[in-house]
Image (spheres, grey):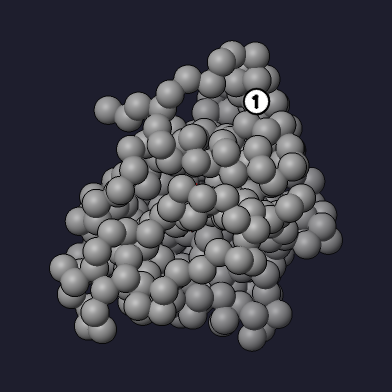
Amino acid sequence: MKAVCWMNGEILPADQAAVSVYDHGLLYGDGVFEGLRFYGGVVFRLEAHLRRLQRSARALALDLPYQAGELARAMREAVGACGAAEGYIRLVITRGPGALGIDPRSCGRANVFVLVDQLTVVDPAVRQQGARLVLSSLRRLGPDGLDPRIKSLNYLNQILARIEANQVGADEAVLLNEAGYIAEGTVDNLFIVEDGVLATPPVSDGALDGITRGAVLEVAAELGVPTVERHLAAYDLYNADECFLTGTGAELIPVGSIGQRRVGIDERPVFERLQAGFADLVGRETQREQAGVEGDVVLA
Ligand code: PMP
């Protein structure tokens, strides 16, 4: 794959794309982004990602300089230029260059870029054995702070949690919310299986409304696995039969342990069905898009 970047309308080799040192995205983390995957040359759930991006931008009073359809075309163009059928896309909108000082009114036009590259977030051994999690001492921010539904360029809350995980040799950290319930991982949503029921925290507990999370809930419904969105605490992790994480980068990753405790049983029957079901869903949607003419994306 040739890593490429669509930058404000122009395709460049990724290592030649750059933004100004005055860009408030760089200076203050002022901006929004999406991480997407493409399979067989087709971007998975493109519209859902664009809808989430639009909402994140609106929440930050950030005007997108392109319509959803134009952003969709930019992504398809960049995917076409990379020469690979599968890979990862980072769509980034920064506030744009402005004066020193946080006031966004000094910024001119937002910068938009689409970076297409490979992303390996999970070691194959971890996929096999299950991720080692730690409960972070950091709390996921509440809706009265930086609302966790905003996919912003500021990931310091999660980065601090990931540093804690790194320091104890774990693969991922789980963040609780201020009430002590599980919100999510640093870059993924969390699920457990207990007595055959698939459970995940509601988005209102501080989780991003993950596209993979949504797809997994759909797959569970198709397979007849009962699902519930409810508060989960550390107690529920310790008592889970199975536990796993979901995200665009990671797809579905089983969890092997939390702190020093093994989570669940060694077999993961529900996880395996959901993982196969997810691969099947991706395959079906990819084929459908490949067969049809890719229409314009217009969001309500
Ligand atoms: N939570 C956070 C904080 C994330 O950054 C991500 C990755 N975008 C997720 C959850 C998973 O979301 P998705 O399935 O849409 O990638």
**In front of the other: 211 or 103:** 103
> Which quarter of the picture shows residue 198?
top right
Q: Residues within 10 Å of mark 1 (few under 14, many from 20)?
A: some
Q: Is mark 1 within 8 Å of ligand 1?
A: no
Q: Position of residue 210 (x, y in %)?
A: 47, 46
Q: Position of residue 179 (x, y in %)?
A: 31, 66
Question: Disc 1 designates what residue?
Answer: 286
Q: How many marks?
A: 1
Determine the residue positioned at 53% across, 60% down: 187
Note whether residue 245 is visible. no
Q: Is residue 32 above or below residue 259?
A: above
Determine the residue positioned at 71% across, 31% down: 40
**In front of the other: 155 or 256:** 155
- Secondary structure, mark 1, is helix
Q: Is residue 186 above or below residue 269?
A: below
Determine the residue positioned at 62% across, 17% down: 288
Q: Residue furthest top?
A: 292
**In front of the other: 283 or 206:** 283
Q: Position of residue 273 (x, y in %)?
A: 71, 32
Note whether residue 112 is visible. yes
**In front of the other: 246 or 86:** 86
> Which quarter of the picture shows residue 50?
top left
Q: Position of residue 222 (x, y in %)?
A: 58, 21
Give the amino acid type for the residue marked by disc 1 in the picture: Thr
Q: Is residue 251 above or below residue 216?
A: below
Q: Which quadrant of the figure contains the C terminus?
A: top left
Q: Is residue 296 above or below residue 1?
A: above
Determine the residue positioned at 41% across, 46% down: 209
Is residue 130 found left or right of 63 in the rendered image? right
